[in-house]
Image (spheres, rainbow, N blue to C red):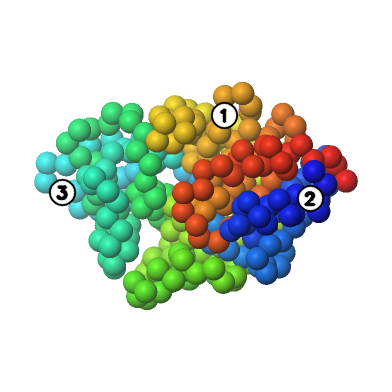
Amino acid sequence: MDCLQLHEYTASTQTNICQIEAFRNGKIFYSDCFNGYKPDDTLHVMSVTKSVVSLLIGIAADKGLIHDVQQPVLDFFPDYTLKRGERTIQQVTIENLLTMTAPYKYRSEPWTKICSSENWTVATLDILGGKAGLTGTFRYSTLGIHILTSIITRTSGLKTVDFANKYLFKPLGVPELCNFEALTAEEHKAFILSKEPKKHIWFCDPQGIGAAGYGLCLSAADMLKLGRLCLDGGMYDGKRIVSEEWIRKSTAPRIQCDETFANMRYGYLWWTPDKNSNAYAALGNSGNVIYINPDTGTVAAITGTFKPNIFDRVQFIQNYIEPMPDV
């Protein structure tokens, strides 16, 4: 397909896509917008946020704020009051949160309980652990990893968004982000469901700590820069932003998921879509994606408005965007 054909195909078959950016061999070979969006508009990129938080944890580790991913989570919260008889939480490490192998005391994520609390960090620690202990079982959690952004804030003395602006977004040339707090459940719902362009914001809790599992609002152009950073082993325009070791460690597959997650593998908040490629990806609901393929040197970023149950976006990139010739 040429660019015009791909635009028409995308508009008719991937109807919620708003922006696409694709890069290879030192240049952008495809850039397009849909549904009235402009290149610098931002969208809520959902769980792509998780992979960005992985980069921030890596930066914090590079700076010595975190000594080891094997550190127990409670090392960072000495003021937290343990519940009587609770032992498992004392064994949970940063790596458990990064690999989604942390245990929780719930059947389904308690959104109302956490998001209506005055302190999300304490509320999240309260649901961590349980009688079953550490089993190594993959348990995908959006709320539970809020502890990671709390750790960044506690160790750096900066709000998550300020840490990210200083050490990640600004060096990449991404516009400065600001915190956004929803004061009512209606505002929270509107943030998730609205199809209108947003500003450069990060959804945060009442303490100003950015939500770790969702909440970042970025453009596809912003996400492409994050993908290029990973492709180049933590370098961007000749500047070291995060260590090559962290990029390697965080994107390496560590957990094999079952059919619930399309038999993909999981690293430190990064997905490996298939076993036939070294490609890895940040995946968010509604088909928001940062796709990095070291084998072909390709990075692709896609944003989309809220539309649940989109599971074919990586295949769309591999089948239609990645094969396009360099322009």
Mark 3 burial class by Cα count in 10 Å: few <14, some 14-19, many 20+ = few
- The amino acid type of the residue labelled 3 equals Lys
Q: Position of residue 154 (x, y in %)?
A: 41, 56
Residue that appears at 64% across and 42% down: 316
Name which quarter of the figure residue 273 lies in: top right
Label placed on residue 83: 3
Q: What element does badge 2 sit on?
A: helix
- The amino acid type of the residue labelled 2 equals Gln
Residue that appears at 51% across and 64% down: 202
- The amino acid type of the residue labelled 1 equals Asp
Residue that appears at 44% across and 27% down: 256
Q: Position of residue 186 (x, y in %)?
A: 37, 74
Q: Would residue 217 be visible to someone looking at this image?
A: yes
Q: In 3D space, how far apart are the residues under numbered discs 3 and 1 (Cα atoms)?
A: 41 Å
Name which quarter of the figure residue 279 lies in: top right
Label placed on residue 274: 1
